[in-house]
Image: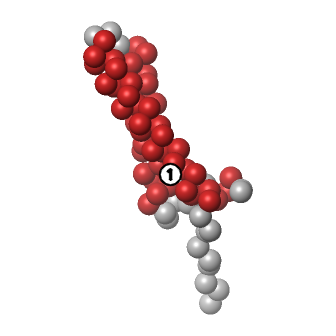
Amino acid sequence: MKLARLFQPRNPLFWIAMVLNALSAALAWIVHNRALDSWAMLIVGIFAVCNALAGSWLVWRLLRDEPPSRAIN
């Protein structure tokens, strides 16, 4: 696996993975820096972990899939 396969700006999975990972980071920051009650912290924390898992799965798919072949004209 090459990490260069991760950067695929024409692939929608790439952008979805970037958005999910950014959202996970933002949610983790909220849990860490804001005063939330226990239930809110639990819900936001679970949502952050689920987003991180989904983003990681998409990154794994990007790394495992064969890159599209370029047509030479």
Q: Closest to the observer: 56 or 26?
A: 56
Say left or right for 29 vs 71.
left
Quadrant placement of the C terminus: bottom right
Q: Is residue 44 visible?
A: yes
The residue wearing badge 1 is 58
* Quadrant in the picture for residue 50: top left
The residue lying furthest to the bottom in this view is 73
Q: Closest to the observer: 62 or 43?
A: 43
Q: Residues within 10 Å of mark 1 (few under 14, many from 20)?
A: many
Tell me which residue sits at (44%, 32%) in the image: 49
Quadrant placement of the N terminus: bottom right
Q: Is residue 7 visible?
A: no
* Quadrant in the picture for residue 51: top left
Tell me which residue sits at (50%, 51%) in the image: 58
Pinpoint residue 46: horizontal percent, then vertical percent: 38, 28
Picture layout, residue 59 above or below residue 21: below
